[in-house]
């Protein structure tokens, strides 16, 4: 049995969208109600999204991990996963607004949250950028969570995803396998997803996510994904 | 026309009520989120009610205030209620009422929690209307444990309030929570929820027939209108519902909700009150001339200013 420990925002989405795929194999649990004594020895616990936690919340997640019974396998340990940093070309939305003249359009705005991720279509002008930020803030997105990424660094059409489930990696182009594996290893993410693009033969990282999106590989991959987790 | 502006978390209260009871009035009362208004970029002449102040962070309140200014500059066809920067939040209101000697219980932010607190206490979030997040907590150790649980849940420490429990039950152990709606100049005495539970939500009400009749009498007579008006004024709220009780001959205020739901209670409860609610809501646009719509947008420099820490 696999226990998926999720941010409370993600639990409903998980239950409504993915329960059929994982029924009987994966049990969603909210971080705050993990009952360590009820997780049996021999099962697997995956902590999702902790790379974006505040230091205080991460520390509490670490304590919850320590309380788990012996013989339980832990993936994405909150004590190991590195705090997530944005890709190198990303700047905060506020910074881009402040230095409008230097802005490198087209831009895409993106939000990373322990519960999930979303991004805007390409934005071509300063006014479009400001309108989108204002709308997102009023739609209750925290300004601290909004990043702006220049689209010129990426060819949006060629973006792909690679999933890691324990020792296995799915959807990986063979020539970049080692590099992508290294990205997961350095981030200390056992179960996650990397969004990347190949630009002029170079691998460009768009996002590395240890959130619940990592539990959403293509439906055809589900059984392989579970099998890989069981093996790892 | 009356337009309620809400955050995504606060949508549906007006819509659900008018779908059930006021389908014919749908052209006179509408609900829209702030971000949808910005996306549309146009605002029709109407009375605008700014709601969800408590759910907003400071940048959101500043952007809402910018929308307020634009609407008011639109001329006589625009009217506004509940200024998002001039209202007191839950913490400010309750602390002020304690300092003024109105409320007997105090409220603390986590960061300023003194060593000695009057137990029992409970925790609730400052920025939602979901009620207490804990049962009554009797010791400091228990309080620390509950705080950790809520932080691990993802709640922001700056949004957590520790509130001293004030026992307002009568000699039979019943709690009687009153609610009065204010809409502009109109008040409606909504209810007295009687419950064995201190939480006092409609779902926890387990009243006798006599208690239900007392609630209906309260609605018909509206006895507390003058009593509660100063608290709305103090909080800077022209549309909302005050929740309070009368205990030991004095009022104890729990909160003022600027986006109250009309969904709770039995069908008979709502049938009795719906006419008064609609009349109060529609009075917000009374005497408002019709006029052209205006464009709404947040200028980048204003946005930058709003986003400042």
Image (cartoon, coloured by chain):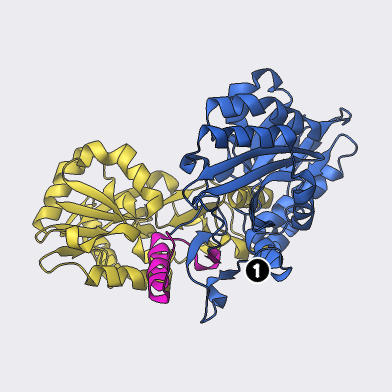
Chain colours: A yellow, B blue
Image spot of residue B127 (x, y percent): 57, 56
Q: Residue at x 70, y 41 (%)?
A: B181
Q: Is residue A47 magenta?
A: no
- Of residue B193 and residue A199, the one placed in the foreground of this image is B193
Report if residue B302 is visible in the image: yes
Image spot of residue A166 (x, y percent): 17, 59
- Of residue B50 and residue B89, the one placed in the foreground of this image is B89
Q: Quadrant of residue B268?
A: top right
Report if residue B12 is visible in the image: no
Residue A137 horizontal side relative to residue B304, left or right: left
Q: What residue does disc 1 label?
A: B309
Task: Specify the subunit that label 1 lies on.
Answer: B
Residue B70 horizontal side relative to residue A94, left or right: right
Q: Which residues are magenta?
A: B135-164
Q: Residue at x 61, y 24 (%)?
A: B271
Residue A189 horizontal side relative to residue B51, left or right: left
- Of residue B208 and residue B285, the one placed in the foreground of this image is B208
Q: Quadrant of residue A68?
A: bottom left
């Amino acid at each position: 049995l696999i226990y998926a420990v999720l941010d409370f925002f993600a639990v409903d989405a998980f239950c409504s969208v993915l329960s059929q795929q994982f029924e009987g194999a994966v049990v969603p649990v909210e971080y705050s109600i993990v009952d360590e004594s009820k997780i049996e020895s021999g099962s697997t616990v995956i902590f999702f999204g902790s790379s974006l936690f505040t230091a205080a919340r991460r520390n509490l997640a670490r304590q919850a991990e320590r309380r788990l019974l012996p013989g339980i396998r832990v993936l994405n340990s909150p004590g190991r996963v590195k705090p997530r940093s944005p890709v190198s070309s990303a700047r905060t939305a506020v910074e881009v607004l402040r230095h409008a003249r230097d802005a490198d359009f087209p831009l895409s705005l993106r939000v990373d949250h322990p519960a999930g991720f979303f991004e805007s279509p390409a934005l071509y002008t300063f006014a479009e950028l400001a309108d989108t930020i204002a709308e997102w803030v009023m739609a209750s997105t925290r300004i601290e969570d909004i990043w702006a990424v220049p689209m010129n660094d990426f060819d949006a059409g060629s973006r792909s995803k690679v999933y890691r489930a324990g020792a296995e990696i799915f959807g990986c182009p063979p020539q970049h396998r080692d590099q992508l594996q290294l990205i997961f290893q350095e981030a200390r993410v056992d179960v996650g997803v990397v969004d990347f693009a190949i630009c002029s033969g170079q691998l460009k990282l768009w996002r590395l996510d240890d959130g619940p999106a990592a539990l959403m590989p293509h439906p055809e991959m589900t059984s392989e994904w579970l099998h890989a987790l069981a093996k790892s | 026309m009356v337009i309620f502006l809400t955050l995504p978390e606060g949508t549906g209260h007006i819509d659900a009520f008018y779908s059930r009871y006021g389908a014919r009035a749908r052209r006179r009362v509408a609900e829209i989120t702030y971000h949808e208004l910005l996306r549309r970029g146009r605002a029709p002449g109407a009375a605008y009610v700014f709601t969800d102040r408590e759910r907003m962070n400071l940048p959101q309140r500043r952007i809402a205030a910018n929308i307020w200014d634009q609407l008011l500059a639109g001329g006589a066809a625009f009217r506004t209620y509940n200024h998002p920067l001039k209202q007191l939040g839950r913490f400010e209101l309750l602390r002020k009422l304690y300092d003024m000697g109105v409320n007997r219980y105090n409220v603390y932010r986590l960061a300023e929690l003194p060593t000695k607190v009057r137990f029992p206490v409970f925790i609730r979030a400052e920025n939602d209307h979901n009620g207490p997040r804990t049962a009554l907590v009797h010791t400091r150790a228990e309080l620390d444990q509950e705080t950790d649980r809520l932080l691990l849940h993802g709640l922001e420490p700056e949004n957590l309030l520790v509130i001293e429990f004030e026992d307002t039950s009568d000699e039979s152990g019943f709690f009687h929570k009153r609610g009065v709606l204010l809409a502009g100049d109109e008040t409606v005495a909504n209810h007295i929820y009687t419950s064995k539970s201190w939480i006092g939500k409609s779902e926890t009400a387990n009243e006798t027939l006599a208690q239900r009749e007392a609630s209906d009498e309260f609605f018909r007579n509206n006895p507390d209108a003058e009593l509660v008006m100063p608290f709305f004024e103090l909080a800077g709220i022209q549309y909302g519902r005050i929740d309070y009780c009368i205990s030991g001959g004095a009022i104890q205020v729990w909160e003022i909700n600027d986006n109250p739901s009309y969904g709770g209670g039995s069908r008979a409860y709502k049938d009795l009150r719906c006419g008064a609610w609609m009349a109060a809501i529609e009075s917000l646009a009374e005497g408002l001339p019709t006029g052209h719509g205006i464009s709404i947008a947040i200028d980048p420099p204003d946005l930058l200013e709003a986003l400042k820490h």
